[in-house]
Image (cartoon, rainbow, N blue to C red):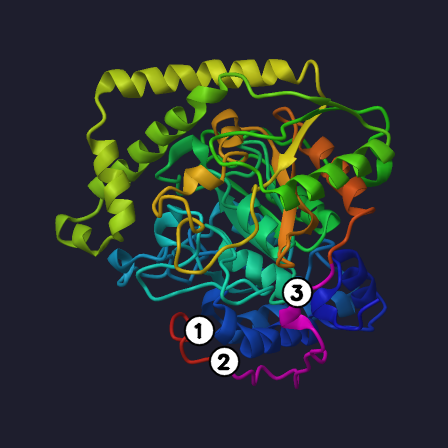
């Protein structure tokens, strides 16, 4: 068991706080030191606010000393993807069009809920421009690198959050997912990521990509994500899609197992063949599920051949809406790939858009009806391991087509089901691969339960970026050296 508190679970940290074996200030200091050590090489953050984080940690420490913690997350270091508002910090969304963005005046709903639970916010994590693609670099000069191999991408668009989670640069991480943006980087970096049922975690301001986009937790363990979701979930009047409060503690029932579960297996989808090594790792994952007592059956998605077109119409229409809302003089600052998608969306006629919307409804209905037959669906989260940075696709595929290599993720944004990626092994280069687990709408607890059962049998270890590193230390007074580039914005 590691003695490095940046790699501890929420449960272990909570116990250590209660026994006064660790303080929130010491933990925040350790995470900030880890950021100072690793972030210049791996680019997880676009903003770090050490002074504010340590002030929050001191407040949490005082509550713990009084025996009055706000929740089990009180004092836990947390990051926020830079598509999500945090009061007092600018939200620049990886875009030069927002260089002059003022600090947000209010927390987004998920941030507000976590703040009320007492978490310590460290900073904001890197995103591609407006979260439009499945790799994490942007026109502002940010580039996230994979902690397993720094010349490989961590995926996207929540790539910065995934890197931070994998390396102990924070314990809890807010990500967003419009077509796989939590699950893809979770798979590529060997962490756990959950896209909850749409509306489970309220969102405001709304995404330009509409009701494709979900908010969810990214963590090193399933239980940590369940604890985070328990706080993030619930109704907020600012989000008219938000689900009502269900009062569920998602940690409860995690250890109940999946004996007797009926699981549909999606082994292939789309035009890209699944490499042999991924097939082998996936086959072993299926054997683990069978050993856990699940009954497996091969299946396919309804309307399978139409899904890419349906998604592309929705995605490009969202991109067009995004650019149309920018001041005309700033549109030339947008990344060419995003501008191309927006132009395609602007050229859509009403009939094609209407057809895609109706087809999506048909698919959503058919997919939910599949869950009368299956409790869950499983697939590879991504059919490949991480490829080179500064690319949108691996060698041999069209450079601008991220949908070609993410066939398993985006259908469940169309359908709005809960879906996660949990580590299932490594590819021939030693890079992580993820198992995707999908449930019917509103069955987030079932997805978490299955992921925890699988996690209990399969582990892939820590990324090489952490190999042999000493446990970080700090002096408790906030004197943390920060890379000038990473501290350049929002630092007080």
Instruction: Name the foreground residue: 450 vs 209.
Output: 450
140, above or below 403, in the image? below
Q: Residues within 10 Å of mark 2 (few under 14, many from 20)?
A: many
Does residue 115 appear in this view? Answer: no
Residue 178 image position (x, y, % from top left): 46, 39
Check residue 304 for magenta coloring.
no
SS at mark 2 in the image: loop
Residue 288 drawn at (x, y percent)? 81, 38
Callout 3 touching callout 2 (CB < 8 Å): no
Mark 1 or mark 3, which is nearer the start of the sequence?
3
Q: Residue at coordinates 49% horizontally, 36% vertically from top-left?
A: 272
- Can you say whether 389 is above or below 466 in the image? above
- The answer to whether residue 383 is left or right of residue 63 is left
Q: Secondary structure at mark 3?
A: loop
Which residues are drawn in magenta? 461-482
Measured in 3D between alpha carbons, the distance from the residue under mark 3 to the one under mark 1, in whole angstroms, is 22 Å
Q: Position of residue 332 (x, y in %)?
A: 17, 53
CA distance separating discs 3 and 2: 22 Å
Label of residue 486 in the image = 1
Q: Is the N terminus in the top left, top right, bottom left or bottom right quadrant?
A: bottom right
Residue 472 located within the stretch drawn in magenta: yes
Residue that sits furthest to the left in the current view: 329
Give the residue number, with chain letter if any, for mark 3: 463
Q: Is residue 174 visible?
A: yes
Quarter of the rendering occupied by the C terminus: bottom left
Q: Main secondary structure of the magenta part?
A: loop
Q: Marks 2 and 1, how far apart in space?
A: 7 Å
Q: Nearer the viewer, residue 58 or 275?
A: 275
Dot in front, 3 or 1 = 3
Identify the disc placed on residue 482: 2
Mark 3 or mark 2, earlier in chain? 3
Position of residue 23 in the picture relative to residue 204 (left or right): right
């Amino acid at each position: 068991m590691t003695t490095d508190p940046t790699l501890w679970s929420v449960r272990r940290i909570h116990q250590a706080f209660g026994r006064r074996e660790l303080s929130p200030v010491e933990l925040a200091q350790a995470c900030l030191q880890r950021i100072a050590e690793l972030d210049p090489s791996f680019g997880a953050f676009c903003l770090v606010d050490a002074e504010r984080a340590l002030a929050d940690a001191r407040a949490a420490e005082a509550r713990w000393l009084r025996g009055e913690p706000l929740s089990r997350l009180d004092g836990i270091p947390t990051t926020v993807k830079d598509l999500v508002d945090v009061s007092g910090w600018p939200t620049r969304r990886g875009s030069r069009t927002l260089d002059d963005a003022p600090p947000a005046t209010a927390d987004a709903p998920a941030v507000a809920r976590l703040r009320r639970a007492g978490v310590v916010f460290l900073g904001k994590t890197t995103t591609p421009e407006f979260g439009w693609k499945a790799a994490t670099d942007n026109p502002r000069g940010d580039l996230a690198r994979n902690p397993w191999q720094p010349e490989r991408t961590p995926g996207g668009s929540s790539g910065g959050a995934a890197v931070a989670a994998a390396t102990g640069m924070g314990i809890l991480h807010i990500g967003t997912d419009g077509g796989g943006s939590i699950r893809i980087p979770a798979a590529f970096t060997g962490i756990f990521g959950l896209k909850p049922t749409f509306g489970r975690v309220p969102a405001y301001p709304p995404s330009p990509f509409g009701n494709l986009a979900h908010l969810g937790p990214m963590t090193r363990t399933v239980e940590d994500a369940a604890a985070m979701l328990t706080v993030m979930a619930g109704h907020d009047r600012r989000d008219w899609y938000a689900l009502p409060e269900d009062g569920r503690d998602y940690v409860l029932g995690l250890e109940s197992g999946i004996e007797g579960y009926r699981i549909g297996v999606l082994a292939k989808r789309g035009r890209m063949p699944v490499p042999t090594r991924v097939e082998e790792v996936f086959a072993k994952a299926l054997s683990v599920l069978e050993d856990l007592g699940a009954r497996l059956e091969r299946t396919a998605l309804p309307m399978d051949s139409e899904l890419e077109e349906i998604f592309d119409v929705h995605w490009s229409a969202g991109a067009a809406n995004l650019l149309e809302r920018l001041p005309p003089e700033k549109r030339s600052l947008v990344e060419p790939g995003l501008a191309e998608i927006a132009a395609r969306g602007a050229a859509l006629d009403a009939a094609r858009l209407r057809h895609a919307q109706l087809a999506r409804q048909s698919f959503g209905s058919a997919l939910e009806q599949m869950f009368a037959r299956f409790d869950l669906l499983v697939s590879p989260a991504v059919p490949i391991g991480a490829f080179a940075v500064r690319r949108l696709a691996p060698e041999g595929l069209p450079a601008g087509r991220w949908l070609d290599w993410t066939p398993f993720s985006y259908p469940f944004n169309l359908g709005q089901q809960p879906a996660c990626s949990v580590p299932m092994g490594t590819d021939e280069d030693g890079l992580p691969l993820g198992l995707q687990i999908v449930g019917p709408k509103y069955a987030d607890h079932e997805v978490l339960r299955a992921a925890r059962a699988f996690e209990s049998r399969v582990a892939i270890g820590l990324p090489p970026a952490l190999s042999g590193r000493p446990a970080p230390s700090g002096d408790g007074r906030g004197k943390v050296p920060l890379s000038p580039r990473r501290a350049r914005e929002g630092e007080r």
